[in-house]
């Protein structure tokens, strides 16, 4: 699963899921790519809760995170995830344009 959005400056934001070999604790990341050169910026983890599944789970019911651009050149990402207390819910993360290139 990957989602791609074009930022106002023409760069591409790519949202994707990574998991360890045992497929536990899935994590969401975003990476910015300049399509006109070989520039690729560091990946950024989307969520602050690092335990449990974020954006994807083993039964497939959470595998539809969304990636949207904002008017100021940033991103908003909406996904299902596990909370630090063991529950689950709809999460949102906002990145300003400066957050994406830091």
Image: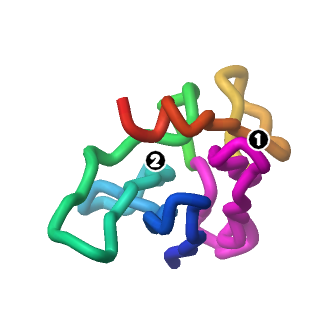
Q: List the single residue furthest toward the left.
A: 38
Q: x, y (%) of residue 82? A: 68, 40
Of tags 2 and 1, the one toward the viewer is 1
Q: What element carries label 1?
A: strand
Residue 28 lies left or right of residue 43; in this view the side is right
Lateral position of residue 96 relative to residue 40, left or right: right
- Residue 71 vs 96, above or below: the answer is below
User: Which residues, given as a range, are shown in magenta?
Assistant: 54-79
Q: Does the magenta segment cover residue 60?
A: yes
Q: Do the residues labelled 2 and 1 touch (CB within 8 Å)?
A: no
Using the image, tell me which numbered label, if any, was put on residue 72: none
Residue on which the image places disc 1: 92
Can see residue 75? Answer: yes
Figure quadrant of the C terminus: top left
Q: Where in the figure is residue 23, as x and y percent of width and height?
A: 38, 62
Q: Is residue 66 magenta?
A: yes
Near-viewer residue (10 or 89): 10
Q: In which quarter of the image is residue 40?
A: bottom left
Residue 1, compared with residue 66, is above or below; it is below
Crowding near the residue tagged with mark 1, few <14, some 14–19, many ≥20 C-alpha atoms within 10 Å: some
Q: Is 74 above or below relative to 60?
A: above
Q: Looking at the image, which residue is at 69% across and 51% down?
A: 77
Instruction: Label 2, secondary structure: give it.
Output: loop
| Furthest residue toward right | 90
- The residue pinned by badge 2 equals 25
């Amino acid at each position: 699963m990957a989602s791609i959005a074009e930022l106002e400056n023409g760069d591409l934001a790519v949202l994707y899921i990574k998991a360890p070999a045992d497929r536990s604790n899935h994590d969401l990341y975003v990476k910015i790519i300049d399509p006109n050169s070989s520039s690729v910026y560091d990946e950024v983890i989307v969520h602050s809760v690092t335990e449990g599944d974020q954006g994807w789970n083993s039964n497939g019911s959470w595998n539809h995170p969304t990636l949207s651009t904002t008017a100021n050149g940033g991103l908003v990402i909406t996904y299902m995830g596990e909370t630090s207390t063991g529950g689950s819910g709809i999460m949102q993360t906002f990145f300003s344009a400066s957050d994406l290139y830091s």
